[in-house]
Amino acid sequence: MDLSAAQEKADAVLLGWYPGAGGGRAVAKLLFGEVSPSGKLPVTFCRNEALSEMPDFTDYAMTGRTYRYYRGEPLYPFGYGLSYGACEVTALSADREKAAVRIVNRGPRDTDEVLELYLKDEQSPYATPENVGIY
């Protein structure tokens, strides 16, 4: 999906994907500011000019294609999302047993926030490459 024109000309892009029967009303509430968006992208959107670097779709290894393996600068990375709030992680701690986080909305509007935490098995030979596509 080429979103380069939207990137140049719009302040934001709202993807409703497949929202179901109540999706139209939910999108309208977002557009009219009744609720704040809080979703995050479940995919990576690459820059249009990078598409020629992608492997053929007959190559099912996904190396160089998905957020786990793409090493270029994406247009919108996996996990990207905007909000009417201004949430900030102010504390984070983790060990092998648990993780704890404190997040504060410093913006003028109430919002929800999707917090994503990624773990890696450093012992596995099948682990994904380091710091790939996670921003």
Image (tube, rainbow, N blue to C red):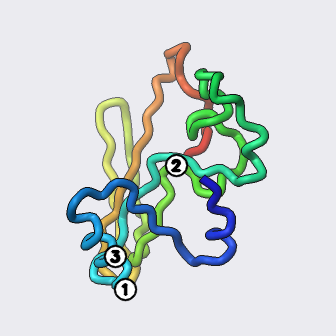
Q: What residue type is labelled 1?
A: Pro
Depth order, front residue of 59/82: 59
Vertically, is 94 above or below 21? Answer: above
Depth order, front residue of 132/96: 132
Q: Which amino acid does label 3 sit on?
A: Leu
Callout 1: few (<14), some (14-19), or many (20+) C-alpha neighbours within 10 Å?
few
Label 2 element class: loop
Q: What separation in Å lies between label 1 and label 3 (alpha carbons)? A: 16 Å
Q: In which quarter of the image is residue 97?
A: top left
Choose the circle earlier in sequence order: 1 or 3.
3
Choose the circle earlier in sequence order: 2 or 1.
2
41 with respect to 128 (left or right): left
Q: Is residue 135 visible?
A: no
Q: What separation in Å lies between label 2 and label 1 (alpha carbons)? A: 26 Å
Depth order, front residue of 45/1: 1
Q: What residue type is labelled 2?
A: Phe
Residue 130: image location, x then y, percent: 61, 33
* Residue behind mark 1: 108
* Residue behind mark 2: 78
Residue 73: image location, x then y, percent: 71, 51
Label 3 element class: helix
Q: Which residue lies furthest to the front in this view?
A: 21
* Residue behind mark 3: 30
Q: Residue furthest left?
A: 22
Vertically, is 97 above or below 82? Answer: above
Q: Residue at x 63, y 35 (%)?
A: 65
